[in-house]
Image: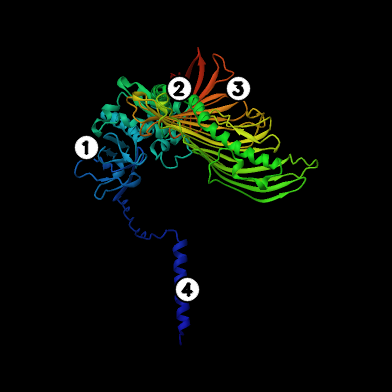
């Protein structure tokens, strides 16, 4: 029999099948050895960190010494990882070889010789230590309080959980319901616009004064500070509510734990008010005497000006009237030197471009004349008429002139009137005026020209009647500037002063020379008086007074008081407006302002404010005719 390979294969398979079925269905179960299980691999141990990133802050502290307190003795041992913070208060500790470094607290030491607070970009004011609980990588005054609670419990033989320590500190600070993250985290990160972080930073900044130089003393120094911590937090909360800037508020802990709030805005305001009341008032008092003396001298100066200038004005008017008479008589072209009585030989009279009709006249007259020591140079341009009645009474007469004598010179050009070089000395009786001069720059233009009455006569005075029209002729006065100054007084009462008066615009002038003022047409004059005050302890002190008219009846006044090197300035200003009259005072950079209403107020009224920037830091009330300031820190102070 020939057995094929397929047959052998099939038989073998059948035998295997039978054997398997028999084993499954026989009365005895087949026992087979269980497979040997694979061995369970040993767990991989977590890698020990070799670096620990730390951030240290009051504000961020650069140059602070930081170490991992492995043996928790609050002293740096040579085998404990350490480093020094850089910008942003950041330091990385090399923890190679330290098992579980996140189970040990961290300590930071700030030194006034080498640690910079990036809040102020200055060295810290004192040496102090801070700490943070194990596992936390932010070190600041708040984390120091939390770690101190934990250390105290451990030293007493007990334990305190991190959560309970956070809760205890929150209670000490009166913070209410806060999270561990809020107290253990970086309050400087994202602080802007975050009320809690701004507040907790202010609290932390004030707690620094309680922190000792040595970390080993933290528990001892903070042990009984719970009450003080609460007062610090409350003081800052109240100061913020009063409008204080959280970044600038400071709380000072004095003897016996007494807490005093320092709001810089209020402190600046108090200092400024003290300046106004003390040295400002002293300078103002010293200014009164020369200022009053100057006013007296100004009155005398007006008479001197009139006396010394009137003759020149009269001479100029006489010369002009000769020209007008020639116009009236139709003899302008025949005008000659002989027509000017008293004129010295050698003078010149030039008439040109004359055109005359029954209703109009045009032409030019140029004069260069000497009358003794007085000189008159004048150019007259005529443009009169035409008019229907052939009187040639309307038109314009523009002229320029230079008149000089031994005392002064007068220049008239394009209607501008200038007095220069006027010396106010008048023998011994006016010795105090020996270095004083007056310059006047003004304009006069006639609204109409009456050739049969003459044009004008001059009258110059420091008080304002600078020019006067003749014979009822109206006109317009355009004053521009008057300066008056020099050295006044003698001996210990010598002082330097100057007065400048300026104004713009056209003002109607009455026949007597007074300006006709209405609510719509008034002289908008500004006067500036400067006086140097020679005073003991105030060398170089000076005062400027600026007076400006703002309407017919109202105006403003500003007094600037300065010490010798301009280190301090007080600017006092006021208004005479009956409805809103007030006094203002500002410091040198105008960052502080005190305003006091002066009109329509009665005892008990709130009459003013103390303002720094746009922030009101004090309100002013009138109490028994005394102005009292109530500052936002709750304190009171008398202004004046």
Where is residue 127 drawn, in percent x and y? 26, 35
Residue holding disc 2: 292
> Pointer 4: residues within 10 angstroms few (<14), some, or many (20+)?
few
Dot in front, 1 or 4: 1
Instruction: Please name the residue shown 66% across and 38% down the image.
Output: 446
- Dot 2 falls on a residue whose secondary structure is helix
Q: CA distance from mark 1 to mark 4?
A: 86 Å
Q: Nearer the viewer, residue 623 or 392?
A: 392
- Say whether disc 1 or disc 3 marks the residue closer to the N-terminus: 1
- Mark 3, mark 4: which one is toward the viewer? 3
Write down the residue under mark 1: 75
Query: Which of label 2 and label 3 is nearer to you?
Result: 2
Q: Residues within 10 Å of mark 2 (few under 14, many from 20)?
A: few
Task: Return the disc, 2 or 3, that comes first in the chain's sequence.
Answer: 2
Callouts 3 and 4 close, C-beta under 8 Å: no
- Per the image, label 4 sits on a secondary structure element best described as helix
Residue wearing tag 4:
14
* Residue nearest the viewer, comparing 619 with 165: 619
Q: Earlier in the sequence, mark 2 or mark 4?
A: 4
Q: How is the image coloured?
A: rainbow
Residue density around tag 1, few if under 14, some if 14–19, many if 20 or more, within 10 Å: some
* Residue found 36% across the figure and 60% down from its top: 35
Task: Tell me the quarter of the picture where residue 131 sits.
Answer: top left
Q: Are marks 1 and 4 in contact (CB under 8 Å)?
A: no
Viewer-side residue, 212 vs 317: 317
């Amino acid at each position: 029999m020939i057995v094929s390979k397929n047959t052998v294969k099939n038989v073998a398979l059948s035998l295997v099948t039978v054997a398997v079925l028999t084993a499954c269905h026989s009365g005895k179960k087949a026992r087979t050895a269980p497979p040997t299980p694979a061995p369970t691999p040993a767990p991989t141990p977590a890698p020990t960190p070799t670096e620990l990133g730390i951030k240290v802050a009051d504000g961020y502290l650069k140059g602070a010494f930081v170490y991992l307190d492995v043996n928790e003795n609050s002293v740096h041992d040579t085998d404990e990882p350490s480093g020094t913070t850089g910008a942003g208060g950041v330091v990385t500790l090399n923890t190679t070889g330290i098992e579980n470094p996140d189970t040990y607290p961290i300590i930071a030491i700030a030194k006034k010789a080498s640690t910079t607070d990036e809040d102020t970009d200055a060295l810290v004011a004192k040496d102090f230590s801070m700490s943070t609980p194990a596992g936390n990588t932010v070190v600041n005054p708040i984390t120091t309080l939390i770690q101190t609670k934990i250390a105290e419990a451990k030293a007493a033989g007990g334990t305190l959980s991190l959560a309970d320590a956070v809760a205890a500190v929150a209670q000490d600070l009166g913070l209410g319901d806060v999270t561990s993250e809020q107290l253990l985290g970086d309050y400087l990160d994202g602080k802007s616009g975050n009320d809690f972080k701004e507040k907790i930073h202010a609290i932390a900044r004030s707690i620094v004064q309680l922190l000792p130089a040595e970390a080993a003393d933290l528990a001892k120094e903070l042990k009984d500070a719970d009450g003080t911590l609460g007062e610090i937090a409350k003081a800052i909360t109240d100061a913020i509510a009063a409008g204080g800037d959280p970044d600038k508020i400071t709380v000072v802990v004095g003897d016996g734990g007494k807490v005093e709030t320092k709001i810089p805005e209020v402190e600046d305001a108090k200092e400024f008010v003290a300046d106004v009341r003390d040295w400002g008032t002293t300078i103002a008092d010293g200014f009164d005497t020369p200022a009053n003396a100057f006013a007296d001298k100004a009155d005398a100066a007006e008479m001197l000006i009139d006396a010394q200038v009137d003759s020149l004005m009269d001479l100029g008017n006489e010369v002009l009237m000769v020209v007008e008479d020639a116009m009236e008589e139709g003899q302008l072209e025949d005008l000659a030197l002989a027509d000017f009585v008293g004129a010295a030989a050698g003078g010149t009279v030039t008439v040109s471009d004359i055109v005359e009709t029954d209703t109009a006249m045009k032409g030019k007259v140029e004069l260069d004349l000497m009358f003794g020591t007085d000189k008159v140079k004048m150019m007259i341009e005529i443009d009169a008429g035409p008019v229907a009645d052939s009187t040639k009474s309307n038109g314009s007469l523009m002229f320029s002139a230079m008149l000089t004598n031994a005392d002064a010179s007068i220049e008239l050009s394009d209607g501008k009137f200038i007095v220069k070089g006027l010396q106010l000395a008048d023998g011994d009786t006016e010795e105090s005026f020996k270095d004083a001069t007056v310059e006047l720059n003004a304009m006069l233009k006639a609204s109409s020209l009456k050739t049969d009455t003459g044009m004008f006569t001059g009258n110059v005075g420091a008080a304002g009647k600078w020019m006067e029209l003749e014979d009822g002729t109206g006109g317009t006065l355009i004053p521009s500037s008057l300066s008056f100054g020099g050295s006044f007084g003698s001996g210990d009462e010598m002082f330097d002063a100057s007065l400048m008066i300026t104004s713009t615009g056209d003002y109607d002038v009455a026949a007597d020379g007074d300006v006709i003022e209405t609510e719509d047409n008034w002289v908008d004059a500004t006067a500036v008086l400067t006086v140097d005050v020679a005073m003991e302890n105030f060398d170089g002190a000076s005062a400027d007074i600026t007076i400006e008219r703002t309407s017919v009846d109202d105006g403003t006044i500003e007094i600037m008081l300065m010490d010798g090197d301009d280190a301090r300035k007080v600017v006092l200003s006021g208004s005479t407006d009956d409805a809103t009259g007030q006094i203002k005072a500002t410091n040198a950079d105008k960052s502080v302002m005190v305003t006091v209403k002066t009109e329509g107020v009665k005892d008990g009224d709130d009459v003013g404010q103390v303002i720094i920037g746009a922030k009101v830091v004090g309100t002013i009330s009138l109490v028994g005719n005394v102005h009292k300031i109530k500052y936002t820190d709750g304190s009171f102070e008398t202004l004046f």
